[in-house]
Amino acid sequence: MPVVPTNRKAILLAIFVAFGGFLFGYDIGVISGCLIMKDFVNRFGEGPEGSRILSSSRQSIITSLLSAGTFVGALGQAFTSDSMGRRGSILFWSAIFTVGTAIQTGTGTSVVQITIGRFIAGLGVGAMSAIVPLYNGETAPKALRGMLVVMYQLQIIIGIFVSYIIDLGTHTISGSASWRIPVGLQMLWGLILLSGIFFLPESPRHLLGNGREEDARKVIAEMNNMPLDDPFVTEQMEELEYGIKAENEGGKATWMECFSTRNKLWYRTMNGMMLQFIQQLNGQNFYYYYGDTFFQSAGTQLSPYVIQTILGAVSVAGTVPALILIETVGRRNSLLTGSLLEAACSIIAGLVGHFTLAPAGTPASQLTSRNKRGGDTLIAFAVLHVFSFSMFWGPTPWVYLSESFPLRVRPKAIALGSATNWIWNFLLSFFAPRIAARIGPLILLIFFGMLIFGFIYVYLFIPETKGLSLEEVDEMYRSGVRPWNSGSWRPQLHEMYEKDEAAHRHRHAAPTATNGAID
């Protein structure tokens, strides 16, 4: 009986690589709590000793340097992923991240040092945000690829949640330990990824793309727990070679190739970038920034740390079902459903907040029953919005980004999508407070409009890729199938491969028969 592939090692490795998302999430979440810690403000704030404040401009510098680093790192990984391989690239950028966190942890009172550390750590975070979906997309079994890439998003959310818990636990400690502990723990996370990375195999698709057939065969056999000469391994090798040859006709690509009309690469690159753009303008980050204001409007006395922890727990709870939904409901339906649910939450929360909430800073003793009911309603829809985002729009754009491109442009196209995410993350964090200061909860109507646009865009332009190999996804885009009909589309790649193999065997068998007749 033939050996049945288990894919167990492939799954374990994908889960481990997704730990890069934990670094990503933890680094994003940890700084918000540090910015309001007393010792942190005394060291890096402005003003006379004992009454220093951390001005909004200085907070912006400390936080935004991470976004600047992530943007550069997301683009930079495209060069290392091709030259050093996926595995080597993960190792390199993990080391960069660890150096950045060490610089931050060792800072005394220098704002320059901590911002430089944030920028260097951001290089690693941005690079990992692109490499992890790239690696998992290329190594995961096609039936589980969506689930394993969602695992990356889950790790991001868990990282944010853990950072909130640690900030909650350390913010009352006197002295620099209050912020050095949560910041310094990032070095441990980086070292964990560095130590385990030596056990990761290289992506078989990258190996084949560089002519290393025997190494690719070993990886396929190892990932499926099968001997090298097993027919399944041979079949997988031949199918990959056939698909890669078909998708890579024309040689190595430049950055401009990502926007070429050949094989609809421009369309696929724009889809990846647009999904990341829409994801950032879903509105969920607004709740993280202003959640404490909403809760206080409802009369709660919860601290900002507790509020962050609550929203972090909701995000984790919402991401867990996405592990199943991404392969059952599918990518396209997840985005469509999420758009409608979040849009409903945004418009209800925005209108209720505008018409019922008390002005910001109103003492709890002066809140009316109307203010409290409005605040409770807004809080409920804020939680539902964050939950819905975590289930649908949080993970799904990363899944699309990992599986929509042919091998020769994959690192570059994923880099463009990831960089789009980071630049809009930066712009949102920069402009949202200013807009909210002018129009208050009505800013949620802007997100409502973006979600309606997102629904229309997904319906018209985003195809279903569930259950397809990366080579079959490429074939689907080249076939020209309409996105709304893509759910019923079936690949022809395997049949074409079988026909070519049969013709090849026939050509080589014919001379033998002739020679036999002559004899």
Image (tube, rainbow, N blue to C red):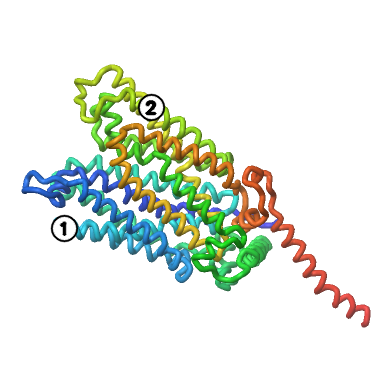
Residue in the foreground of this view, choosing between 470 and 434: 434
**Lateral position of residue 199 relative to residue 518, left or right:** left
Question: Which is closer to the viewer, label 2 or label 1?
Answer: 2
User: Please, what is the three-letter code of the amino acid marked with disc 2?
Assistant: Leu
Circle 2 sits on which residue?
Answer: 351
Question: For mark 1, does the 10 Å Cα neighbourhood hold few (<14), some (14 to 19), or many (20 or more) residues?
Answer: few
Residue in the foreground of this view, choosing between 425 and 351: 351
Q: Label 2, label 1: how many angstroms apart (C-alpha)? A: 44 Å
Callout 1 secondary element: loop
Compared to residue 7, the image places residue 309 above or below, namely above
Residue 213 position in % (x across, y down): 59, 71
Callout 2 secondary element: helix
Residue 40 position in % (x across, y down): 17, 48
Residue positioned 41% across, 57% down in the render: 128
Q: Quadrant of the C terminus?
A: bottom right
Compared to residue 381, the image places residue 223 above or below, namely below
Circle 1 sits on which residue?
Answer: 110
Q: In the picture, residue 515 is in which quadrant?
A: bottom right
User: Please, what is the three-letter code of the amino acid marked with disc 1?
Assistant: Ser
Residue positioned 48% across, 33% down in the render: 341
Residue 133 position in % (x across, y down): 48, 55
**Lateral position of residue 113 relative to residue 122, left or right:** left
